[in-house]
Every structure is written in C-alpha cells, then in structure tokens.
Image: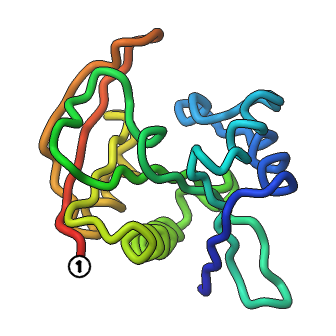
Amino acid sequence: MAYLIRPMDDAAARAVITWRYAPPYDVYSFNGQEAVRRFLCAPANDYHAVYAGEEAQRQLAGFCCFGLDARVPGGNYAAPALDVGVGMRPDLTGSGHGHEFVGAVIAYGAARHRPLVLRATIAEFNERSQRVFSGHGFQPVQRFERITRPPRDFVVMLRAAD
C-alpha cells in the first residue's frame, strides 16, 4: 500500500480525535477533545497525518509524531535519538497493516530529521506494537513505570537509523 505523510491539518486532526479504540487500546482514544485537536495541529508539536492508498482513493490511515511528544514521563531519554510515535485508525489495527505503516513513518522521520538512532516508547501491554517495531529492528532497552496517573508500564525500544 502507498503511504503519504503530511503535516497534520485541521481536517485530519478532527478525524483523529473522534477515533475510538476497543479495550485495552481505549487508552489511545482522544474522546473528541478540542484541546487535543489544537495540539495536534500546532507545527511545534511535529504531528503528521498518514494517508494510505493511491492518489484517487487516499484515506487517512493514522498519524505520527517525532520528538518530545513521543516520550513518556518517567523514561530515560538522556541518549540522543529521534523519538517516534504512531497511531493507526482503529479499524486498521490488528489486521496486518502495521508493519508497512510503521515502515513508512520511520522512513519519513529518518529522511526529515537525519537521526543516528530511532527510539519508540510503547505501552508494555501493547504487544502488537512491540512486534511491529521489533520487525523493523528495534530492540527493547528499558522498562519503566510512567510517573503520571494512571501508572502504566512502558518499554523503550531503539534501533540505528539506516
């Protein structure tokens, strides 16, 4: 599938904040929060919309972010790396699209930021996402509990950039 990644715009952000994920992934739902829409659209926050399909039938498939907002309070981020965060449209999750989706995001982020190392912080319960990132060469290097409420365990994964 072809992917196109563009800076987040208002239309994409409005769609993203309406997405509802089934438990236990419901922690990723934004519940229509207007403040989140504005945050996603602010260029300084480095959020991007990910579209899938050929040009005539391209649809919003997810989003990604790079930098500080891809981090989770409590993790050790002292080593330099490009932090990568992803979110896929709920109806596309768990159906084999993740590997190609994350691959497109990694390629885009690496071309745009030119990092030496890529880093992803993933909720420990989200084994699907961990498998997808592992499939792209990421290795777990740290486990920690988030310091904000509610507490949740996370895994930090690294890989060298190409």
Query: Residue at image x 77%, y 27%?
Result: 35
Which of 60/69 is in front?
69
Query: Residue at image x 58%, y 44%?
Result: 45
- Relative horizontal placement of residue 33, taking residue 3 as reference (left or right): right
The residue to which callout 1 is attached is 162
Element type where label 1 sits in the image: loop
Q: Is residue 103 above or below residue 118?
A: below
Callout count: 1
Q: Residue furthest left?
A: 141
Whether residue 96 is visible, yes or no, is no
- Relative horizontal placement of residue 146, taking residue 140 as reference (left or right): right
- Relative horizontal placement of residue 50, taking residue 108 as reference (left or right): right
Image quadrant occupied by the C terminus: bottom left
Q: Residue furthest top?
A: 149
Q: Is residue 41 above or below residue 48?
A: above
Q: Position of residue 159 (x, y in %)?
A: 19, 62
- Relative horizontal placement of residue 125, taking residue 1 as reference (left or right): left
Image quadrant occupied by the N terminus: bottom right
Q: Position of residue 7 (x, y in %)?
A: 67, 63
Q: Position of residue 104 (x, y in %)?
A: 48, 75
What colour scheme has been applied to the protein in the rendered image? rainbow
